[in-house]
Amino acid sequence: MKIISDPVEISAFWNEVEMKTPGHSRLEACIQCGSCGGSCPVAGDMDYTPRKIFAMIRAGMEEEVLKSNTPWYCVSCYTCAVRCPQDIHITDIMYTLKNMAIEKGLCKINSAKHFSKTFIGYVESNGRSFEFGLATRQSLRYMPMGMLGTAAVGLGMLTKNRMEMTPSKIENINQLQTILATAKELEVTS
Amino acid sequence: MKKYLFYPGCSMGDVARSYMVSLMAIKERIGLDLQEIDDWNCCGATEYFSVNQLPAHALVGRNLALAQDQSNGLDTIMAPCSACYLNLSKTENYMGENQALNDAVNAALGAGGLNYKPGSMEIRHLLDIIYHDIGLDVIKQHVTNPLKGLRVAAYYGCLIFRPDVNNRWTNPKSQMAFEDIMEALGASVVDYPMRAECCSGHMPQIDRGTAYEMIRHLINGAAEQSADVIATLCPMCQLNLDMYQKEMNKYFRKQYSIPVLYITQLMGLAFGANPDELGIGSEFINPRAALERVGTDFPEEELRPKQKKKNEGLPMPTMPSEVKER
Amino acid sequence: MTDKKVKSNGDERVGVYVCHCGSNIAGVVDVEGVAKWATEELGDKGVVIGKDYKFMCSSLGQEMIQEDIKKEKLTRVVVAACSPHLHEKTFRTATERGGLNPYLCEMASIREQVSWVHTDKTIATEKAKAMINGAVERVIRHQPLEPIRVPINEATLIVGGGIAGIQAALEIANTGYPVYLVEREPSIGGHMAQFDKTFPTLDCSACILTPRMSEVGTHPNITLLTWSEVENVDGYVGNFNVTVRKKARYVDEELCTGCRICVQKCPKKVIDDVFEVGLGYRKAIYTPFDQAIPNIPVMDAENCTFFEKGTCKACEKFCPTEAIDFEQEDEVLNLDVGNIILATGYDLFDTRRIPQYGYGKFENVFTSLEFERMCNAAGPTNGEIFLRDGKTQPESVGIIHCVGSRDVNYNEHCSAICCMQSLKFAHLVHERTGGKVYNFYIDIRTPAKDYEEFYNKVLEEGTMFVRGKVGEVTDVPRLNEESGKLYIQAEDTLAGVQRRIPVDMVILSAALEPRYDANDVAKQFGISCSSNGWFTEKHPKLDPVATMTEGLFIAGCATGPKDIPASVAQGSAASARVISYIEAGELELEPVRATVDETKCSGCLICNDLCPFNAIEYIEEKDVSYIQEALCQGCGTCVAACPAGAISGTGFSNEQVLAQIDGLLMVDFKPAAVEKA
């Protein structure tokens, strides 16, 4: 039987989402009109449309929301955000949900999680993104069957001089790492 | 010469090398003086924000702070990549609007000996600068090899128009900037209804099927309008539409073959530059056949979007370029 | 404690009444103590009696004041109670009944300003005392005042000939008083004349409207001024002088019989942007619709061949009564009226502002007014529902609610009528075509009588409702099965899926907005309007047809979106108010006004522009400013602004106000013994 009843639990999740989104997300203003779900280019492939996710947040359905693929399928095109009649910062909320899904270990789209983390890994070591490394590690892990196809594309990129085999690094990488470390600490405490 | 601080973004060094090369090739001609921000770091694309929001803002913040320190009297950062443009302008804007975020980001920057005062830097996309600052007249002056005969689908992608945190594109006229520039180069612009729809971003890494469908929709739209080439202004868009086009063809059993070139490459060609100087040749879909159309004639009717002929039916409403705001 | 028994200072005899207001005041302020204090300590100022009572506003409380005035021969009254906003009138009336001039009563608001905002009883009680002290200091300096009596001119000006204006005009005219009805279009009727059927009864709009229009046209008490606009408004309630410009019709109204041969013969056809909303045509000389009142055509000089090139004159040639007059000029009329009703109506939201709905881009996207014209039997398709080609019936129609309403990007408000209108459209499509109908909504708003029943009727007709604000209307196929239609993409929020529904025709239920020049009109007439242009009523709940400016009333959609019954009700309400003023013959206005001391005025004109009620004028011959009593609302802005201190407010003179301040600060107060509770 699924009946949602605990008022404390309900607001805890919503409050957390609100707090972790920079600025004022205006999620409380949602009239559930469906403009976002109607505009989203990927809504057809999401477990729940953006609008439904907001209804679920308001009902405190933390697990369902964070386990869903919706935040990961969001392509950050901002179409929903510009059309929302209540000016809700939808895309920012999607980023927050991604953060929380990873943090709480509920993210089910491992390929997305891995992609983001690998990307960040390179940025944090080098200060720049590293396509070759990223593409290789991602396809090795998540699309091994498609390796041949991917390898062909990858080879194409290399021969057309559109991919470097070694990462480039910024000079002041220590400075960047210090900054990021401080930011991470602050994020935990805020 | 118009001077700007320059934030290239990671792709310009590899994936979008031709964008960089072609930009460098044309900048002198149109009077662009670009001062690269010293030791800039990655903007984080969409990936960093997916994992940690505050560090993501701090990551961008370092670039803003470096630019501010370097400024030399310049206060505008030009970013040619839409995603970098979005991240820089979003962080800049959010820091200005939200004191708590500002304090947190500056605390993090402070640990690295940096600080950024929101409002110090204006962030603008390359298209914005070419259209508003350089202007169509200057462009026309330098056209020695008009792209007559070339049918172009001008593809903006998402992030240049949305969320438009600094209201740079509210004037409806400016929303035709890309088309106007292409016409100034002598090319013929096709009607492209999906001009601001999403290229699918990083979706190819997550769900190929969904991504290919979005890419197919864009390529198909251009094909329907008989476009010879799709013009882009973002490395991500170019990559998705170009690199994955053949994969997408296989997936859907289609035979699309529309090359995808950067705005700067087309500008370079019109200015008489050699294709090699502009990085042409590094695309997956070969633009050679399309470029051979330059200088040819073709029947006008092929190109014109479905014009509303004077019919016996009911009249259509008038569409002035300026819609009246109250 | 010295002997401070009840003794007046010889000049005035003041009665102080301190109200408990149940426990509202008494719960925080020591009311008995304060009353006693007033009697004992303020005797040298004139207080002869101080009482406290549970509810001063009750009949007993009021009677107490009346009796005391007579018994104690009081010359001034102070009531320390709630806000004057609530009961100033009550206590003034009581004072008057007691035989004293009502303006010799002053209130001290020890509820809103003391007991409701302080919790510390000591402080509250001391503050109450200070306030009463201030009130006493003030009231002993009050002069008896007589209300200003303004005669009311019998005539009324009504601006706007839509249903609200028509209703108001008929009500007043039928009572026997003259009305000037000014309408900017060539005919009265307003938007209601454009509709086909009205919800929920599905009455034919013209059928119920035209009898009223006819009555207006033939009424002996109504002077109909169409194709006219108000240029200037001077004066004040009861005595307005209005300048109206009757634009040249180029047709002599006396000679014209309304035969319309001129219209037939006119060779120049243009798109009718106003009445036909761009969907149909009219001639350069035209009447907007067949039942137009007055039935006299108007020449559109901008599009007339004669005015452009000097040729044609077909209308003149064929007119059997020689009524065409190309030399005709605008006529400027000066009207004296007592009251004005503004019923100027609404404009439709410009749907081109929402590009993703495709209006103007796709042929078969129509606005609500366009669809009304299409359904109207006298419209461009004779009442048949066709696509833009004028001949094909649609097989499926999508009706989109909330276009430009309930959206921070355009208009935050809900337009009140579009849900019902959309249901009506659904019904009409069922009635006239075999087509499928989809309504895309966020909420279905059916608040009035028989409205919900109408919704049920439309449901039973098989209308398909999709709850989802439409994302976009597109002709680009996205899925394999699609081709050749318009697709409405929306999330079906009740099913939780994105849907793309193919339709032949899309109808946009666009928002109702204030008229594009509403702000200018409001300024011209001296009333206020909201930032987007809806006229502001005096009180949103209790006074919906009056404005803050005496003698100016508002009715209909000009104050906010509403349906026809509500507009009619407001028209009647406004006319009833006007009639009551006219019947009273004269109006009593608050004598609290500002006056200019001519000896001190230097003619600097600073006050003229500052007055929010346009009450100050400059008399050039004397080089001084003059304040129109009747327009002045006593706000005090000019009093404060005058650099020479030449303006003082009756009932708010410098002396009175300064004395009150001193009283509040207990400046002259010599306490016998200040008791700290």
Image (cartoon, helix red, strand yellow):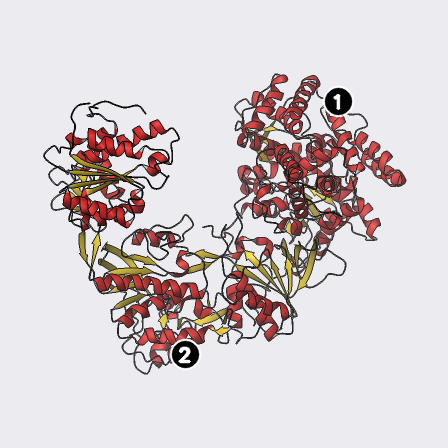
Q: Is residue C374 visible?
A: yes
- Please indicate whether residue B192 sits to the left or right of residue C597 in the image: right
Residue A59 position within the rendered picture, expressed as x and y whole percent measured from the top left: 66, 44
Neighbourhood count class around disc 2 (C-alpha, 10 Å): few under 14, some 14–19, many 20 upward: some
Mark number, residue C265: 2
Please name the amino acid that badge 2 sits on: Lys
Quarter in which the C terminus of chain A is drawn? top right
- Please report, as a chain letter, where disc 2 is located: C
Element at badge 1? helix
Q: Is residue C39 above or below residue C595?
A: above
Q: Toward the viewer: C588 or C192?
A: C588
Q: Are marks 1 and 2 in contact (CB under 8 Å)?
A: no
Residue sitting at 67 percent across and 22 percent down?
Answer: A185
Mark number, residue A59: none
Q: Is residue C639 above or below residue C490?
A: above
Q: Which residue is mark 1?
A: A125
Residue B106 position within the rendered picture, expressed as x and y whole percent measured from the top left: 59, 22
Please name the amino acid that badge 1 sits on: Ser
Residue B210 position within the rendered picture, expressed as x and y whole percent measured from the top left: 77, 47
Q: Toward the viewer: C438 or C366?
A: C438
Disc 1 or disc 2, which is closer to the eye?
Answer: 1
Q: How far is the residue under mark 1 from the one under mark 2? A: 84 Å
Q: Toward the viewer: C421 or C358?
A: C421
- Please report, as a chain letter, where disc 1 is located: A
Q: Is residue C462 above or below residue A75?
A: below
Residue A119 position within the rendered picture, expressed as x and y whole percent measured from the top left: 75, 30
Q: What is the total number of numbered labels drawn onto the structure image? A: 2
Neighbourhood count class around disc 1 (C-alpha, 10 Å): few under 14, some 14–19, many 20 upward: some
- Please indicate whether residue B136 sits to the left or right of residue C37 in the image: right
